[in-house]
Amino acid sequence: MNNLIRKSAIAVMCALFSFTVQAGEHYGLSEGQQQCYSRAMVGLDSVINSRIGVPIEEAMEITRKLGNHSISEQFDKSYLLAVLHAYMWNDSPHTYAIKVFSECTVEQTNSITQASAG
């Protein structure tokens, strides 16, 4: 029974990840905004998964496998870090998603600023 619950939770995580990656496309967001939104939603889901007992190893492996198909290595690492840090988060999943989204947008802004200055 416990194995069935774990597999169900992992299936939900996979489904949410695929929907999250596609969700930003419907709102006319830039590529950077889509990446930040997706990362935040994966973080939100990961906080929930940590609280329902999905082992972090399984969550990291699924994220790694799903992320390898069309995104850069740096982007892939940012997803894995979002999952890892989610498992240590003590506040609500919503506040974690906001934190991840905010940090991502700051990273992107700094990256654009450095690119235009150099």
Image: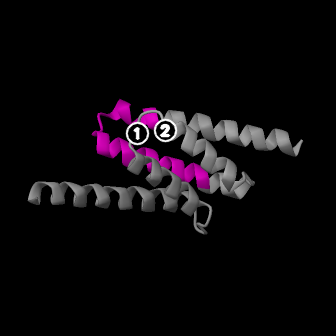
Across and down, in percent, residue 13 comes to 62, 41
Q: Residue at x 36, y 32 (%)?
A: 25
Element carrying mark 2: loop
Across and down, in percent, residue 90 comes to 61, 69
State if disc 1 and disc 2 touch (CB < 8 Å). Answer: yes
Across and down, in percent, residue 53 comes to 75, 54
Q: Which residues are magenta?
A: 21-46
Q: Amino acid at mark 1?
A: Ile
Residue identified by numbered label 2: 68
The image quadrant where one finds the N terminus is: top right
> How far apart are labels 2 and 1 at the CA level?
6 Å
Residue identified by numbered label 1: 71
In the figure, residue 117 lies in which quadrant?
Answer: bottom left
| Residue extending farthest front | 73
Q: Residue at x 44, y 54 (%)?
A: 78
Vertical order, 35 against 85 (above or below): above
Mark sitting on residue 17: none
| Left or right: residue 9 compared with residue 22 | right
| Left or right: residue 83 compared with residue 8 | left
Element carrying mark 1: loop
| Left or right: residue 62 compared with residue 82 | right
Q: Amino acid at mark 2?
A: Asn
Q: In front: 62, or 105?
A: 62
The image quadrant where one finds the C terminus is: bottom left
Vertical order, 113 against 2 (above or below): below
Q: Residues within 10 Å of mark 1 (few under 14, many from 20)?
A: few
Q: Residue at x 58, y 66 (%)?
A: 89
